[in-house]
Amino acid sequence: MRHYVLFDTKEIHLNLLPLSFTRPIAQFRVGIDTIADKWNALLGAECTFRPVEYLRMKFEQLPADDADTIYIAGNIIPTSELAEKVAGLKKGETLYDEKGIVAVRGITPSEETVCPEGELELLETRRINYVFDIFLRNAEVLREDFRRITAGRKSRPLSVSNRVIGPYLDEEGNPLIFLEEGASAEGAVFNTTEGPVYIGEDAQVMECAAVRGPVAFNRKVKIKMGAKIYGGTTFGPYCKIGGEVDNTVVFGYSNKAHDGYLGNAVVGEWCNIGAGVNASNLKNDYSFIRIWNYATRSFMRTKLQFCGLIMGDHSKAGINCMFNTATVVGVGCNIYGSGFPRVFIPSFSEGSPASGFSDVSLKKFYDIAERVLSRRELMLDDEDRRIYERVYAVAESLKH
């Protein structure tokens, strides 16, 4: 029986912190679902993971026999054509792109594995190499996911109380607004001129919300009254969203339930962004942004003009907080008060720009996290605690 394993390298893991602190990269949400979900659907098999070492205690499930195992780079967004090439690999064969291994059969990849010299066919792939690649690719991938997920299926009817601007059906007669079982929308405005709208199982769009596709609201998402949601935006399951959001991905279980602006941003799980929080995504001088990079422990230059908030799991922002362009917030942070905090906030930090920041102890973090998780009838287990202990150690090294 063939097995598929989505593997991470240390280099890519570091470049994708703080979002990769707590999950394999293939569990990143890009488009409607995760990278792993896409591979599962296109390969017709359940992929497993091989993340960096400290995450393996929770996520790794390697098959016993490597001979019939295909390892796939976990940061690659698949297409049906690529999935077909991967599934057709023979033992010992390897696919490469300009960044290295795309997939290999029967050989466990290592950090030292490099492309052989000489002429070689290099595939064109879409990799998530840095955190901002998530929102840069989200609109394109969301459109593809919408076609895959809704193909041949019937949407629940859209209530006549809504207003649709643009076509309701595409050229082949398929709906551009798709409601899963239990989804509802009343009194909202949907614009499909630039892309589709996906409303997941038991999701709710409240009255006077303005939604411009392509967007995806996954299971149990609540879009609050008067929210303004622009294209290229995805909300993972159980999010509550209000205010103005543009080209943003929220992995899931996080809330931005009130007025305030968030754009060109990525937010992890179990985060809360309070009322009136605004995050800049453009510098006043229109210059290219620099963003904190964990791999180099310095600010990296980019050619991006737009980049907003990047926030790791279990972080919080109190009412009326403000964030400068391209602020990176680690795991388990609590930010409050007036003024702009620094543009890199290490994990397990709490405080305000006025009073300064101090450490959050693991005990305090666990107490808060357990209360948050219990609202979804979930709990921290021993594996989770060992992962957070590792993240805490990394945070301490960055503070001193």
Image (cartoon, helix red, strand yellow):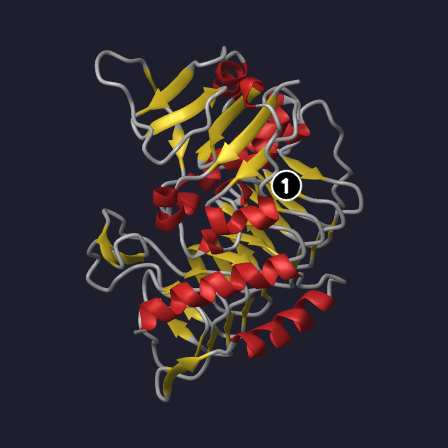
Density class for disc 1 (Cα within 10 Å; few <14, some 14-19, many ≥20) is many
- Residue 15 lies, with reference to residue 336, above or below; the image says above
Quadrant of the rendering where the N terminus is positioned: top right
> Horizontal and vertical percent for residue 226?
60, 63
Q: Nearer the viewer, residue 11 or 188?
A: 11
> Horizontal and vertical percent for residue 140?
46, 34
Q: Quadrant of residue 9?
A: top left
Quadrant of the rendering where the C terminus is positioned: bottom left
Q: Nearer the viewer, residue 237 or 113?
A: 113
> Horizontal and vertical percent for residue 223?
64, 58
Looking at the image, which residue is at 34% across and 76% down?
Answer: 340
* Residue 134 visible in the snapshot: yes
Furthest-bottom residue in this view: 355
Q: Which residue is mark 1?
A: 198
- Residue 337 lies, with reference to residue 48, above or below; the image says below
Furthest-right residue in this view: 182
Looking at the image, which residue is at 62% across and 33% down?
Answer: 176
* Residue 241 visible in the snapshot: no
Q: Secondary structure at mark 1?
A: strand
278 relative position to 43: left or right: left
Amino acid carrying mark 1 in the image: Tyr
Looking at the image, which residue is at 53% across and 63% down?
Answer: 388
98 relative position to 5: left or right: left
> Horizontal and vertical percent for residue 43?
60, 22
317 relative position to 125: left or right: right
Q: Nearer the viewer, residue 179 or 132?
A: 132
Give the total of numbered labels.
1
